[in-house]
């Protein structure tokens, strides 16, 4: 009958509305949970952003502390080596069985030192690197003096003579730098070579700074990292590891400009 059909339609409508209401309630609950999650996420993000300055401050402090400790260790090691010098270019085995006697005679002859000059040699030995093969560079000889002034006189004599030979072979005298300083000085020398190719004069003040003589004057950079932008403008790329680059960005070291032309 019509009345029954109307009743069935009404019941179906109520059932449908009930299902829709239930679905809407479920959607509302899920939406509420999502809104809460978004609120919590935003709060955590805000809290993290609030902590960033403190974290940055702590990181700077730790990097500065590490840099200071590294500098102190470097200074202690350099001080321990201040009575040493290195000789490069001497073939392996020339010292026979007595390195000190060999070095003494070689320095007196090659540097033309006074025969009565007391060299105050304490000890001498090959560097502790692996003994080289025929195709690899020769190991240096490390010489330790008991008197710092004598060592300085010897090395200054060698540097002033420039072209020092032993049995017709060119040999070189240099300070006994730490491994870290040697690495940095090597990097600086490579940059200086590139600058020389561009007819730009540059030198490396101790320990491993870079001093460039430009038309506008001389600029001294404490590290290659600080010289990177200037060198890039001159077409020279400076390779830096990420850790060093990050530390430079956080701590930084300024360069000193020196007035006057080269």
Image (tube, rainbow, N blue to C red):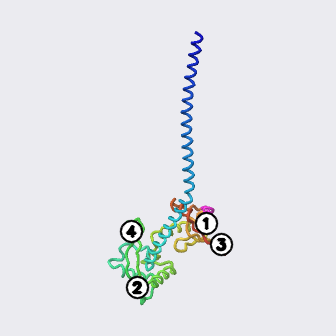
Q: Pointers 1 and 2 in contact (CB under 8 A)? A: no
Magenta stretch? 229-235
Q: Which disc, if any, is residue 217?
A: 3
- Name the quarter where the N terminus is drawn: top right
Q: Residue at x 49, y 82 (%)?
A: 157
Nearer to me, 110 or 48: 48
Label 1 and label 2: CA atoms lie apart by: 44 Å
Q: Which callout, 1 or 2, points at the residue further toward the start of the chain?
A: 2
Q: Kindly identify which residue carries mark 2.
A: 120
Of circles 1 and 4, which is in front? 4
Q: In this view, does 229 lie above or below 16?
A: below
Nearer to me, 226 or 6: 6
Q: In this view, does 250 lie above or below 10?
A: below
Q: Which callout, 3 or 2, points at the residue further toward the start of the chain?
A: 2
Q: What element carries label 4?
A: loop
Q: Is mark 1 on a helix, strand or loop?
A: loop
Q: Looking at the picture, how far across and down is residue 85, in whole percent?
A: 44, 77
The reply to whether residue 228 is in sight is yes
Q: Which disc, if any, is residue 198?
A: 1
* Crowd tier of the residue under label 2, counting other residues whose Cα lies within 10 Å: few below 14, some 14–19, many 20 or above: some
Q: Looking at the picture, how far across and down is residue 118, in whole percent?
A: 41, 88
Q: Pointers 4 and 3 in contact (CB under 8 A)? A: no
The residue furthest top is: 1
Q: Looking at the picture, how far across and down is residue 52, in whole percent?
A: 55, 57
Q: Which callout, 4 or 2, points at the residue further toward the start of the chain?
A: 2
* Crowd tier of the residue under label 4, counting other residues whose Cα lies within 10 Å: few below 14, some 14–19, many 20 or above: few
Q: Which callout, 4 or 3, points at the residue further toward the start of the chain?
A: 4
Q: Kindly identify which residue carries mark 4.
A: 129
């Amino acid at each position: 009958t019509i009345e029954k059909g109307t009743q069935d339609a009404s019941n179906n409508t109520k059932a449908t509305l009930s299902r829709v209401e239930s679905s809407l309630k479920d959607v509302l609950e899920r939406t509420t949970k999502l809104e809460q999650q978004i609120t919590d996420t935003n709060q955590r993000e805000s809290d993290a952003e609030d902590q960033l300055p403190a974290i940055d401050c702590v990181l700077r402090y730790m990097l500065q502390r590490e840099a200071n400790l590294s500098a102190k260790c470097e200074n202690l090691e350099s001080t321990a080596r201040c009575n040493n010098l290195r000789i490069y270019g001497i073939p392996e085995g020339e010292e026979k069985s007595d390195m000190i006697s060999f070095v003494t005679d070689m320095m007196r002859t090659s540097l033309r030192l006074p025969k009565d000059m007391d060299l105050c040699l304490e000890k001498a030995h090959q560097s502790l690197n692996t003994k080289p093969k025929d195709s690899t560079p020769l190991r240096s000889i490390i010489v330790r003096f008991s008197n710092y002034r004598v060592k300085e006189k010897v090395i200054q004599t060698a540097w002033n003579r420039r072209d020092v030979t032993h049995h017709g072979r060119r040999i070189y005298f240099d300070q006994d730098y730490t491994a870290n300083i040697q690495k940095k000085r090597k990097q600086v020398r490579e940059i200086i070579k590139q600058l020389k190719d561009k007819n730009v004069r540059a030198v490396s003040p101790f320990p491993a700074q870079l001093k460039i003589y430009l038309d506008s004057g001389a600029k001294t950079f404490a590290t290659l990292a600080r010289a990177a932008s200037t060198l890039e403008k001159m077409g020279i790329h400076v390779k830096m590891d990420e850790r060093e680059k990050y530390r430079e960005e956080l701590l930084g070291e300024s360069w000193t400009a020196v007035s006057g032309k080269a």
